[in-house]
Image: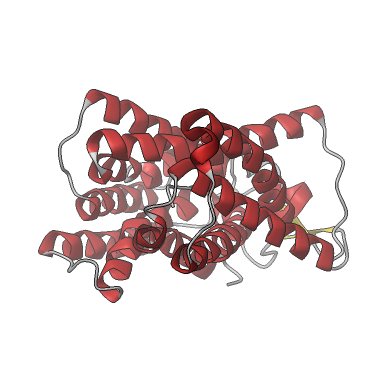
């Protein structure tokens, strides 16, 4: 995964699997479930950080603002917006709006190469088709737009932090900060009923959502993001609905339609087109924290660099 493509693809496909696995926890209070998921993920990430001997890194005020913004918008508010949009209009509308994320990230990376822009557009079209065009309400659309902003923030606010903190610390710090935010939201929305003892099936579901979808996907994504830059990395966001389709098929929850398969094919084609874009332009030197030697080392030093600017869902 030295060039980041495998990591980014695995991360976004894994995020897509939460739609099917969420069936195991559908009867658990929604926001209480979010708090449980992120609490478990925070505990695991703190254990990983401690096991690797990664010490706390002192942050500047600007870095604290970025980290707080990441936890608030990219994690907590994103989850609220996805949940409320799905309640107001069903999952198709928010899935359709989030299908535009690859195109937005391609534009956020500066002036994109024509092939990258074409590829991102094709990925967005495929993701929209796979998510389902459906109908919605104005309320659902507004919540979906909030989720769109949150998804963009998840990448753009992390990029300036990754050279200093590395993928593990960014994942850990943001998850730890998001946990009390989600707990407060859960208490405000669901009161004391936000928590109860989970069943065995719910416990397994939360374990998967916390360890695989949150810890695993976050680490993979934040490792790949500085290597690929927001434009190329954003292409893989189109794999989220593909992951949902495959999971539904494997678990016997749904059989993909012709539109689902066509959308998945467009996503794959768009990614291939986008990744074939010219990589010989001017690129910025991006570093990431080395967890072993505790020093900053160049990422992907054998390749040309990508110039990048400053640049997780209902259980």
Residue farthest left in this picture: 258
Depth order, front residue of 35/174: 35
User: Residue at image x 75%, y 33%?
Assistant: 64
Q: How is the image coloured?
A: secondary structure
Q: Is residue 199 left or right of residue 286?
A: left
Depth order, front residue of 81/26: 26
User: Residue at image x 20%, y 52%?
Assistant: 129
Is residue 11 depicted above or below 234 in this figure?
Answer: below
Q: In this view, does 130 lie to the left or right of 105?
A: left
Is residue 75 depicted above or below 185 in this figure?
Answer: below
- Give how far across and how far down residue 215 sits, in percent: 60, 60
Q: Quadrant of the N terminus?
A: bottom right
- Give how far across and how far down residue 300 sits, in percent: 66, 64
Is residue 74 depicted above or below 7 in this figure?
Answer: above
Q: In this view, does 290 lie to the left or right of 159?
A: right
**Residue 253, quarter of the rendered image:** bottom left
User: Residue at image x 61%, y 55%?
Assistant: 222
- Give how far across and how far down residue 159 sits, in percent: 63, 44
Asked whether the viewer can see residue 23, the reply is yes
Is residue 202 depicted above or below 29 in this figure?
Answer: below
Q: How many numbered markers are drawn?
A: 0
Asked whether the viewer can see residue 311, the reply is no
- Give how far across and how far down residue 283 sits, in percent: 61, 49
Q: Is residue 118 left or right of residue 156?
A: left
**Residue 183, quarter of the rendered image:** top right
């Amino acid at each position: 995964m030295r060039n980041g493509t495998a990591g980014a693809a695995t991360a976004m496909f894994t995020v897509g699997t939460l739609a099917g696995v969420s069936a195991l926890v559908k009867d658990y209070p929604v926001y209480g479930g979010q708090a449980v998921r992120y609490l478990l993920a925070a505990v695991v990430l703190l254990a990983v950080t401690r096991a690797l001997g990664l010490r706390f890194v002192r942050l500047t005020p600007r870095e604290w603002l970025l980290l707080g913004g990441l936890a608030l918008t990219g994690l907590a508010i994103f989850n609220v917006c996805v949940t409320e949009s799905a309640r107001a209009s069903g999952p198709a509308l928010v899935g359709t709006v989030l299908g535009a994320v690859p195109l937005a990230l391609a534009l956020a990376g500066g002036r994109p190469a024509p092939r990258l822009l074409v590829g991102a557009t094709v990925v967005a079209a495929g993701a929209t088709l796979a998510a389902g065009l459906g109908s919605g309400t104005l309320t659902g659309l507004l919540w979906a737009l909030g989720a769109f902003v949150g998804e963009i923030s998840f990448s753009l606010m992390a990029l300036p932090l990754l050279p200093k903190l590395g993928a593990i610390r960014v994942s850990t710090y943001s998850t730890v900060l998001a946990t009390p935010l989600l707990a407060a939201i859960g208490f405000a929305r669901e009161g004391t009923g936000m928590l109860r003892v989970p069943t065995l099936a719910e416990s397994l579901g939360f374990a998967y959502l916390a360890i695989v979808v949150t810890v695993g996907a976050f680490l993979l994504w934040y490792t790949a993001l500085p290597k690929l830059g927001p434009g190329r990395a954003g292409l893989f966001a189109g794999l989220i609905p593909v992951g949902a389709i495959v999971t539904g098929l494997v678990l016997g929850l749904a059989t993909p339609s012709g539109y689902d398969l066509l959308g998945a094919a467009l996503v794959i084609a768009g990614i291939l087109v986008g990744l074939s874009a010219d990589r010989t332009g001017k690129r910025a030197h991006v570093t990431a924290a080395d967890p072993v030697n505790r020093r900053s080392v160049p990422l992907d030093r054998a390749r040309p660099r990508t110039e990048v600017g400053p640049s997780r869902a209902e259980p």
